[in-house]
Amino acid sequence: KNAKDVITTLTPSPFSSICCWISLSPILTFLIQIPTLMATASALSSLSSLSLHNRTSRIISSKPIVSFSFVKRSSSLTLLKASSSDQIETFFYEDENPEITANAVFDPPSAPEGFVAPPYFDEGADETEVEIATAYEELYGPAYSGESLLGKDVNVMDSKIKKSGGGIGGSKPKKDKIRDGFEERVVQVRRVTKVVKGGKQLKFRAIVVVGDKQGNVGVGCAKAKEVVAAVQKSAIDARRNIVQVPMTKYLTFPHRAEGDYGAAKVMLRPASPGTGVIAGGAVRIVLEMAGVENALGKQLGSNNALNNARATLAAVLQMRQFRDVALDRGIPMEELWK
C-alpha cells in the first residue's frame, strides 16, 4: 500500500503538467530570445555613428527589458563672415605712439679698439695667373703643364689628342706641341685610300721622326682623315719607339753597320770630324735628329721613305760602344785594339 501511494504521488497528473509548463514558459521564451539579443548588440556596436549609453541591468522575466538610447554625434560649425577691407582698421607703430618714434636715437655699439674692417670682395687688385697657380698648387698639388721630366710622357698627350677630337672622324685637333725636349721632323705625308664595299675611304699617312739631338731618336707612322691629326699621331707613335744611338766624342758612329727593313737596305759608316752628314732622304733626317754630325749613309735597294728610316734604326741597333765590347770580353779598353 505504501508503494502504491509513492507511485501515485510521483506520477504527475495532466493538470499538474500543464501548470508546470505555464510556469516555465517565460524562462523558455527568454532563452530562445538570447541569440537574437546578442546579434542585435553586435550590430549596434559596429555602427560608427551610433553609441550605446545608459545600459540598464537585465531582469529575467517573461519579457526581458533592455534599455538603449541612441545619440547622434553632432559637430558644431561656426561660420564667420569676413569683413570688407574698408572696415579693417590698420595702424603702424608711428601712428600708435608718434612721440616714442620722434625721440628715438640710433646709437649702434662702437667697434672694439684695434678693429680693422675687412675689405669688400670687389676691392683690391686682381690676382695674377702666377698667384692663382701657386694657390692651386698649395691646395691640390702641382698640375700637369704638358712638360715631362723623363721626356716620354706619351700616354698623357695621346689621351689629350683623343679628347680634342683628333682621332678618326673627329674635328680639328688643337695644335698643342709636346714640350719634352724632342724635336719633330716630318719625313713624308701621303694620301692613301681604302676600298670598301661602299666606296673608297680617303686618309692621310704621315711619317715623323723625333729626336733630342743627344743620341735619342724615333720613327713613327700614323693615319688620319686630316693632315694635322696624322702628324700628331705619328709624333706620339715615334715617341713610343725611341732608340739610343751610340756615338763617340766626335759625334760619329763607333764602327760600320748595315740594316735592312723590307726591301730597303741602309749602310752607315763613321766619318772624321768636319765631314758632316753625307746621306739623303730619310736616312739624313734620322741621323740629324739623333745628333750625329759626322757620318756617311747610303740607301741600297728600295727608295721607300718609311722602310729606309726603319732600316737606319735597325743599323743603329747593331752598333755598340767600345766600353761595352771591352766589358763583354773582360779586358780593359787599352787592350781592345791589340
Image (cartoon, rainbow, N blue to C red):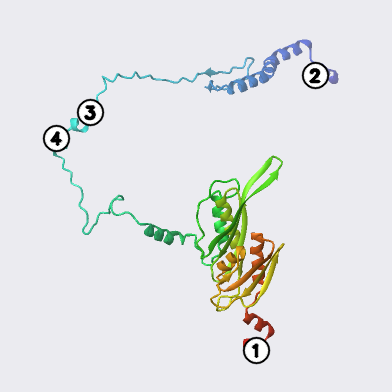
According to the picture, the residue beneath numbered tag 1 turns out to be 335
Label 3 to label 2: alpha-carbon separation: 104 Å
Q: Are marks 1 and 3 in contact (CB under 8 Å)?
A: no
Q: Could you say which quadrant of the image residue 234 lies in?
A: bottom right
Q: Could you say which quadrant of the image residue 41 lies in?
A: top right
Res 240 seen here: no
Q: Mark 4 or mark 1, which is nearer to you?
A: 1
Name the residue at 69% across, 39% down: 198
Measuring from the top left, give residue 57's x and y in whole percent. Answer: 57, 22
Q: Secondary structure at mark 4?
A: helix
Q: Secondary structure at mark 1?
A: helix
Q: Are marks 3 and 4 in contact (CB under 8 Å)?
A: no
Q: Looking at the picture, which amino acid does disc 1 mark?
A: Glu
At label 3, counting other C-alpha atoms closer than 10 Å, the crowd grade (few under 14, some 14-19, many 20 or more) is: few
Q: Earlier in the sequence, mark 1 or mark 3?
A: 3
Q: Mark 4 or mark 2, which is nearer to you?
A: 4
At label 2, counting other C-alpha atoms closer than 10 Å, the crowd grade (few under 14, some 14-19, many 20 or more) is: few
According to the picture, the residue beneath numbered tag 2 turns out to be 10
Name the residue at 70% across, 14% down: 25
Q: Earlier in the sequence, mark 2 or mark 1?
A: 2
**Image quarter (top left, top right, bottom left or bottom right) of the N terminus:** top right
According to the picture, the residue beneath numbered tag 3 turns out to be 91
According to the picture, the residue beneath numbered tag 4 turns out to be 99
Which residue sits furthest top? 15
> Left or right: 128 with respect to 304?
left
Q: Earlier in the sequence, mark 3 or mark 4?
A: 3
